[in-house]
Every structure is written in structure tokens, then in C-alpha cells.
Amino acid sequence: MVLRLEAVQKSFHDSERVVPVLKGVSFDLEAGQTLALRGESGSGKSTLLHIAGALEAADAGRVWVSGHDLTQMDDGGRAALRRSDIALIFQQFNLIPSLTVAANIAFQSALSGRVDQAHIKQIVTALGLDDQMEKYPEALSGGQQQRVAIARAIAAKPKLMLADEPTGNLDEDTADNVLEQMLKLVAQTGTALMVVTHSPIIAARMDRQLHLRSGLLV
Amino acid sequence: MIKSCLRALLSHWRRNPVQLFAYLAGLALATALWSGVQAINSEARASYDAAATTLGEGQNNLLIPKQGDRIPQDVYISLRRSGWLVSPVIDGRLGDVRLVGVDLVTSATGLGGDTDINQSTNFTGETLLANPETAQNLAGIAEVIVDASIAPGVAVGDIGLVQRLLERDDLTRLILLADQPIAQPSLGTIAPDLRMQRAQQTTDIAQLTNSFHLNLTAFGLLSFAVGLFIVHSTIGLAFEQRRGMIRTLRALGVPLRTLVVLITVEMMILAAIGAGFGIVLGYLIAAFLLPDVAATVRGLYGAQISGTLELRASWWVSGLLLALVGTAVALSSRIWQISQMPLLASVRPRAWVIATASRFRLQTIGSIILLTATVPMTLFWDGLLAGFAVLGCLLIGAALALPALAADVLTVLQKNTVAPVWSWFWADTRQQLPGLSLALMALLLAVSANIGVSTMVSSFRLTFVSFLDQRLAPELFIQVDTADQSAALETYLKSRNIEALPLLRTQTTIAEQPVALYGVRVGQTYRDSWVFLDETPNAWEQVAGNGAVVVNEQLARRADLWVGDLVQITPDLALPISAVVGDYGNPKGQVILSETVFQNLHPDLYPSQFGVRTQQAVQLRSDIVDTLGIEDNAIIDQSAVKALSLAIFERTFVVTSALNILTLGVASFAILMSLLTLADLRVPQLAPVWALGMTRRRLGWLELLRAVLLAGLVFVCAIPMGLGLAWVLLTIINVEAFGWKLPMYLFPLEYIQLGGYAMIAAFLAAMWPALRLMRTPPSTLLRVFASER
Amino acid sequence: MNVKLLIFMIFFPFTVMAQGFSGLGSDAQGFATPDANPSFSFPADHGAHPDYRIEWWYLTANLKARDGTAYGLQWTLFRTALAPGEAEGWQSPQIWFAHAAVTTPDQHFATERFARGGIGQAGVNAAPFRAWIDEWALEGADFDTMVLNAAGPDFGYDMSLQARGPLVFHGDKGYSVKSAEGQASYYYSQPYFEISGTLKLPTGDVEVTGDAWLDREWSSQPLSDNQTGWDWFSLAFEDGAKLMGFQLRQTDGSLYSSSTWIAADGTTTPYGDGAFSAAPLATTTVKNRDIPTRWRVTLPEQDVDVVVDALNPNAWMGLSIPYWEGPVSVSGSHTGQGYLEMTGYE
């Protein structure tokens, strides 16, 4: 079991009141499995993704990532887990603007000290980034930047990959292509993938679909 | 992890070299001005210390001649043989070098240099000790051991050698050793021609020059503050721009603690590098300015400063520490922000100073408190420190008031503008104030310092010139060496019916102050040319009638005396003050008596200097030389003295003006950096205006105009502040430091010129950012609409 | 008397430095050296011998006040030459310095003076005799009748001296050997002075009388390299006999001794190395040094076996050259009093 959520609850505090976002969510995700998380805006999809990605702590319930209980971990432990086992792909591409594409792609694997150049080469070619390696992110189009972010995530050989609208900024053809590549690479490495998306087309490509409504799985 | 992380952090600087330059240059400038000034100060202090130890002045009581400057050697022997434990010193000039001869065997302090003569097999009675500069001047005259700790311009050696070099067989002064035997005959019975000069009465050069160095230090600190503004804004910029990177790094699994440590180390190492450059630069500044400082101090006080600069830990360590502490302070708030920043905080860049009305309000309150505090401080707190405290409150208080004031001015302008473009311009300018406020404050400090100092310098110049006219009224000054010469000269002048102004002088102590006591023959010249600060009617008549004295302002202020007060001249004689006279540039107190009173007090003294009124100065001069055998170089032409005095004075403030220009330069650099910082943040603000039809070129010009207008606003605020500064300098600090108050004059044209400089500086600073704006590709502007951040 | 030898050694760097004062090199060969079989010529030899490197006029006195309190007094004028000979003015190679001290049972006062030769600040005239530095002087019409004065920041004295016996010559008729290698000096004494006068102490003036001993010594090559210090005794016994004895301590722990026995009738017997011996019985810690202040002194040839005790163990001369010098009392085979000087206890 790569990811396991058990009765996870999360609320946000704004100045006047407490807004519950997740009201008790439980599910499992196995290695090599892909999962689409769907729901309306504000249904708590992103929050759930952040909790699964060890970026935020749940208020109640428990979360395991590759056997580690996140609720028992401090900030340093969660950071270490993010470094080694988790890869995140955001809507905003979150590249480091002052590093080249090549350095960006290798960055997360470099952080945990296990750069696999052959693997990276394969990913880069698969995503069609061969000619972009020495460029800086600002010189790339939105779609190219998103592919760099995906390449970085896959290069880190994570056990769990979390993607928030990974193709949201891409035109339909590119989105299709990128998704194809992602699924192929994930299948090769046995990574568990959870994708947050509005798109029924993308959701349909996943092994499983979950719907989130008003903080509960339906 | 650390390596990759560090690489990512440092890549920011590689991609933004201008920022790196700003950061390093800001620190370098701050450190350079501070450490440069400190270097000058410590070099000067070391020179004074060396002078004090080399010459043994100020530490010991001395026996000196009542008249002249020679002591026969047998007087020394008589004193020793009667139990007066004194050590002989001979002091004289050989070319440009002051030769000081001491007797090692009886001297308590040795030669005073660092050279341990007991260990130095090179030192012999035929050897002089001197610093490297002086040693060069002695080449071929005597063998010299180079010892950097010997005072500049001085060479020290055995008394026998120095006597031979000076071709003299007498002594200059006798140092009274600390331990004297239980019984001694009185000095008068053994050496009636000598008198004791108490240690504390000898001129303490360090004390005299303190105010001058305080002045320099104040400038150094001011420059440092301005430099720190730059550092603060660069750090702010760097953090804003790296906010996204920091978030990404954390998301990718870099622990917060690691990140904080790495950023701190990175910034501090860079700060150390910048400060290192600054120290090198400071050394260069100091080396460049030192000759002028040396000239100034020599001219004002007769103190020697070595012209060569030594790398002393005292100044470069203090510069480095100040730079690191300043950086750490600026850094700490940023680090705190990072540590508080939620991992998923928005990556949208914000202006690094949050523009809030409450912040301006807080600054205004602070400003009011500081400015109000200056009033009681001026009234109830005396001393140099108080002067500087008032100065500090004034400067910081005014600087704090600036942003709020500027905001109000801009609001008024906006309300009274109809044209939409200009209405937008004023509103936009106002919006930028928070980001620019630090730079504007720096400019305010620099401009007001400029106004203050130029007011002081020009006031000094006006006062000084008229003072010279008053004091140098006689056309010739004649110095005589003997009583016979004195009498002969007076008879001669009388026979030719020429007005002579004999001057009797001696040193004494009045009201616990060292005072020069003068006996004058009151005549038309005194009545016509002397201008008093305060006087009773017929002031000179009272002096001439032996019933009053004139004192200089220094004595009056230090001893808390004024017109009408009695001055105790000797235990038996007290005379009222009929007038107080301004006496600029002189550190010592003066009491002026009538010739008659002086001669009653000191019957053994004769006039050693004569002022002579004549229309035929050249002819009279040669007549006196031919008839009386007075040497030509003992006669001084008044116009020569005046020219020399003015020349000395002109050099006095060269240093100050150089520092002024540097400060203004640093301030304009601060503006440049702030504008560059704002430039990226401004793109989203400017894009809509551009989209509505304003050309990039027009936008660029408006940016320039804005900078110049803000500088103009700053300048308007700087005028009252600069004048306040000048007032504090002239009436508080000058009195505390020098003992005299300078009248304050206003120089509107100079101020307008300064305003022009400030606006030019702002224009130059804004030029690059404006050009960048003009050349911003439309795609960048478009991206504001295209990409939601 | 030998503090001066130590002084010389300590002064040596200074000497090397100062030799340049006369423009001469540091070549010690320029100095005269003492000859065996000396022939003295008085009063000239009471005066200075500028061709020799070092010389002194060294007076010590055991004094008593009317109330019976014992005091000690020292007055010494040293001459050291940076080069042989004399010159006028500051060019003179002669350096003079002087020590004066008064010891009471519980206090010790000491002070010193320095002077350059050639300028009149210090010197010695043979006849009429006058040895002076600053206002201090030892002077008289001849060498037998003199007055003496000195003063420091906290004490002073004015004394009169009257010789009651002849000069005494040490070693071989005044040629005193100081080491096995043959270093030697000219050395004679006037041990028969009666002294009286006033000690000026912080507590007030004290009228005193007593006996004084004046040493005259000059040399150019005073000590051997391996000698670290010495212990010098001048003892006056109640039966009228006197003993001058010293031992030089050597780096290997051995001693070199020399002594002169002055019988009550004035006849002298010199003894070479080994006859005289002195062994510490007790030490006192003075200025962080352990100084022997109680000695067993023997001269078997004259049946002398006495214990010598310091009147005031803290008689430390804390001057430019520190040493111990003070009055002592004698008990044992003989009783009496005297003076002890110890140097080289670092």
C-alpha cells in the first residue's frame, strides 16, 4: 500500500469562522495503481492532495505514505519523505527559474542523492525535451514547462506521484500526449499516481475514480 | 541535498548579477566609507599617541624657560645637583624634521618608540629613531633606525647627537620625573629663569582634534546608514524574487531549518565578501583623503599626522563587524518571514514593504517624538554627546516624517489634477512610496547633510575672513629675540613716528584654564578694527585705563564668564571684562590686558612681537633690517600671513566636501537599487496603462520625471532639516568642541545648486530603470494578462 | 663587593647598545685589566679609573639609635664604562648610577639614581675626596674624614664618618681573584669607619651611631661565564676582629670562595678558594623568591663557626637590578654584626 488515508478531516480558519473542508475521507492506493480525484471547485480536492503529499497535516484521521504514518512525523520527517518517496506536479509548474531545464529535471533526485542519468535521458526523450535542456524555464512555453515539471517528478523515481490538473495549461493535443507519456512512465516504474482533475477524459484514463463532494467521498 | 540546494540558491545570483552587484556594492560602499573614515581617525590618533609618548608631552610636569626656548645645560646640572630629578630634552628643527634629543640614562620613559633599544644592537648614540617617511628626510644626515611608532615628522636620538646635529649646547625643556626626593630647595633659588608647566596644562593634541574626528566619524556613520539602506533593499528584493524558489524547494522536500541555515550562511558570506571589498575601498579612500586630513589638522592645530596609512585592526575589524551586524539585522526579518511563511503561500511577488497607512502613521508618531525630544535636549543637556544626540534625533525624526509627508503632498496633487494621465501619475507615484521610502530617506539624509555642512563651511569662511582682517590689521609683524632688540626697535619706530603695537605675551592659568596672557598698547588700530561679540561702552578705554580686560570667547565660555564679570588674573589682581572678542580657529583662551598692567605683573618680560602700521611696508622692512640688524625672516608681511591662513582654512574642509559628495553618490545608488527592485513588480501595474494606449517610451519618461519630482520633494524637506543641522553644528557642537560659536549665515544659491545636484543624482539613478522600461518587450507586458500567476 | 658584577651582567645588553655613545666598538680588549702585585697610589686611587670597565664606592653601616633599635644603611656609587677613557660632555662613555638604602627591623627603603659622565652630574674626585651623583655625595678633605648624604622619595640620611684604622687590602695585596679561571679585581676596604648622623624616615628623624665599612673595587673582567651569583659577608666581631668573605655560586653547583681575616690588631690574612664557607640554614620568601636569610658561616683556620641572621629578612633592593642587601647579627663561636649581600636569586 503506497498511500492510505483513514478518516481524514481538515478545516480552515478564516477570520470569523471555521470552514470544514474534509469531513472524514478514507481510501487506499496501491503501487502501480492510478487514481483520478474529481469534484467541484472547493470540494477539497487540492487540500486532500496536499495532505497526501505531506505538504499539510490533517486535523484528524491518519495518513500513511509507503508505510510511514504522516501524522506521527515532524516537519523534518515529512520533508525527508517528500524528498525520497513523493513527487508533486502542480498547476503552477514550480520550476526554479534560475536553473536550466536539465538542472531542474535532475533537481529532486539530486536532493536525495540518487541521480540516474540514463533514466533521465529516457524521460527527457519521451517527453520531447531533448532540445530544451540548456534553456531556462522563462524561455519555454507553458506546455513545455509543464513537461519539465513532469519529467522532474518522474526522474525522482517516487513511490507516490501526485498531480494537480497536470494538463490544465495545455492545449488538448499536448495534454493528451503528456498524459500518455506520464501513464507510460508510471507504468514502467510501478509508481502510484493520483491525479486531481476536472476533466472526465483524463479521469477515464485512470484505474479508479473518486468523487469528492462537500468534503466527503461519494 | 545541501549541495543541490546551495546550487539552486546561488543560481539566483548568477541569473541576476545586477542584484548581486547591488548587494555587494551596497555593503562595500557602506563599509568603505565607514572604515575609510575610521582608518583616517585611527591613523591620526596613533600619530597623536606617538607624539605624546615620543615627546613625553602631556604626561609629565615640565620645567620650561620663562622667556625664550633655551635652557643652559649648567642649569640642568645645578638642578640635578640640588636634588631636582629632571631629564633633559633638546628639541629643534633640522630642515623639515623635528629632532628630539633625550638622555636615556635619566629619562623614565626611554625613547618612546616600539624599538626596544635595550634589545636593539643597532641603536647607538649615533643613531636616530624615526618613522619611514621621516627617515627618508634624514638620509645623509644621520644613521636612522626605522620605527613606525615614532611620531611623524619627528626623529628621536641621544641628546648628545641631537645637540651636535642642531649645533647647540643647550636644552629645550626638562621633564620632571614622577618620584622626587624628600627635600629640595625651591625652584626659584636654583633656576630662577625656569617655571614649571603642569602636565595637564600642556596641549593635548588628541583632545583638541577630537571634534574634528567626531565630525569625520559622524559622516562615516551617516554613510554607513545610507549604505545599509541599500543592503536592506537588496536583501528585500532578493527574498521577494526567491520566494517562489523557496516554496518549490520546500515542496520538493528541503526542510525549513536547512533552508534557513543555508540562506543565512549564503547571505552572510556574501556580506563578508562585500565588506571585504569595502575595506579595500575604504583603505583607498583613506589613503586618498589622508594627505588632506593631515594638512587640515596641521593647519588647524599644528598636529602631525603620518601621511602613510597602516592597516590597523581597529578600523577594519569595526567596519567588517558593522557590515555583518547590519546585514544580520536586515536579514533577520526576512528569515523570520520565511520561517512563518506557510509552505503553500502564494508565490505572487509583493512589494517588500507593505504599504499601509498604519506604517506611515507609526513612522510619523516616531518622528514627532524624536523631533520634540530635541527641544528639551538642546535646553537641558550640555556636551558634545548631547550635540550629536540632537543631531541624530533631528535627522532620523525628519527622515521618518518624509514618507507620510510625501504621501499627503501627492494626495493633494492628485485631487487637484484633472487630466486623467496626471491623476494616474500622482496616484501611481503615491503607490510606489513605500518601496522608495528608504531610498528617499537616504537621499534626504545626504542632501540635508550637504546643506548643513555647506552652511557651516560658508559661515565659517565669512566669519574667518573678517576675523583675519581685524586681527591682521597691522601691515608688518616683527619678531624680536632679545630685550635689547625690542627696545631698539621701539625707539626706532618712535623716531620715525610710526605707530607700533608692541605685544607682550606669556602663558598662565586663569579660572583653571590654560590662557595666553597678552599686554597690548591700546591705540587707534585696536579701536577701529576689533569687532566684539559683546562689550560695554568704551571697552578699549577701560582696558587702556588699566581697569578692565578683553577676553576671547573660548575663555569666556569655558570659564562661564561674560562682560562685566571679574577675572582673577593673579591672586592679587581681578579685573572686569569690558568685552568678549571672537577668536576663531584658536583652541586656547586669551586675556588681553593693557601694556602697563602686564608689565607690572611680569616686569622681566619685554615685547617680543610688534605690529607696525605703515603704508610703505617694503621700504620700512628693509630699513629695519639694515638699521637694527633684525633678520628679514623675523619680519612678516601681513598679506602673506592672511594668504597662508586662508589657504590653511580652504584645505580644512576639503575632506568634508569630499565626504559630502560621496554621501550623495551613495544615496543616488540607493535610489537606483530601489527602482530596480520595483521595476519587476511594476510590470503588472504598468501593463494596463500600456494596454490603454500609453507608449512604453512615455511610461519611461514618466518614471524619470517621477524620480526627479520625488528628489525635488526630498530637497524641499531637506532645506529646513539641513538648516537645523547647521544650527546644531554651529551653535552646539562647535561651542562644545572648539569653544566658540559661529554666526550662521544663509546661502540660498548654494542650496538651490545642491537641489539641482540631488535631482541630477535622482535622474541618473532613474535612467537605467526607465530605459529598461522603455525596452520592455510587449510580450512581457502581455504575459501579465496571459498568465495567471 | 659584588652586586655590581651582576649589575654589569644585566646591564650588558644596554652596554652593548650604549658603547656606540663614544663611537667605539664593543671590543673589551680596549679596557685595562688588573695586574697581580698591584701598587696603589693614594689619594689618586680613591678616584675613578675610567680605563676599567666597572668600579664602585660601596659603603654599608650597622647603626644603633639611642633607644637601642638597630638600623642598616647602604650608599653605593657605581661607574660603568661603555668604552675605556673619558671624554667631555655627552660624548663621555662613562655611566654612573647609585643605590641608597636604609633598613629598619621591619622596613626597608631603597632608591637609585642614574647619570651620564662628562657633564658634571656625577663623578669622583680623589683629593679632596668627593664622590657624587645628583645631590648625593660622599666627601671630605681626605679619605678618613667624610660626610655622606642621600635621599629618595620616602627617606634620606645625613652622616659623618671618621676612620679609626688603616685601609685593608684583600687577596694578594689588593689583587682579588674571583674565579678559578683567574678573573680578578682590585679590591681594598676601609672597615674602620665610625659613623653618626640622622636617618630621615617617614616616622621622623632618628639620630644614630655605629660602624661603617667602605669597599673600593674596580675591574674589567669581573665574572666567569659559569658564575650565577654570590653571597658576600662583611662581619665585625665583638672581640675586634673582622671577616670579609664571599662565595661565587657556579652553574654546576660548586662554589668559589675567598676571604680576608682582619685581626683585632689590624693584621690581615687572605684565604683562597675553599677556606671560607657559607651554607643556608633558612630561607625567606621575598618578592616570590626564596632568599637564604640565616646562614652558617665557617672559617676553620680562624675557628670561626657562626650563625648569621638577617636583621630584616625583607631587605630587598627592588631597583633596576634587584638584589638582597641588609644588616645581619652574628652568633656562635663569635658574636657581632655585619652586612650581607646576595645576588642571583631569581
Image: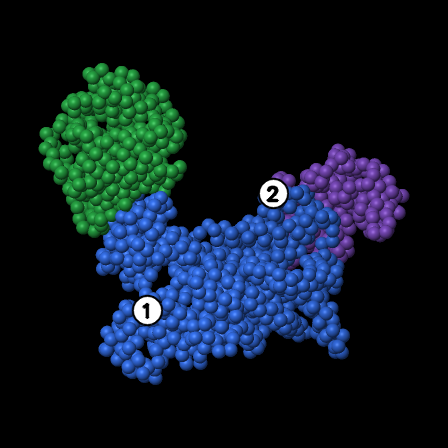
Chain drawn blue in the picture:
B
Chain drawn purple in the picture:
A
Residue A29 pos. (x, y %):
79, 38
Distance CA(mark 2)–CA(mark 1): 85 Å
Q: Residue at x 60, y 60 (%)?
A: B381
Residue A76 pos. (x, y %):
69, 39
The subunit carrying tag 1 is B
Q: Residue at x 51, y 78 (%)?
A: B537
Q: Quadrant of residue B724?
A: bottom right
Q: Residue at x 77, y 49 (%)?
A: A164
Task: Give the residue number, with chain letter if any, for mark 2.
Answer: B2
Q: Quadrant of residue B693?
A: bottom right
Secondary structure type for disc 2: helix
Residue B554 pos. (x, y %):
48, 66
| Mark 2 neighbour class, 10 Å CA radius: few under 14, some 14 to 19, many 20 or more | some
Q: Amino acid at mark 2?
A: Ile
Front residue of this view, candidates C20 and B122: C20
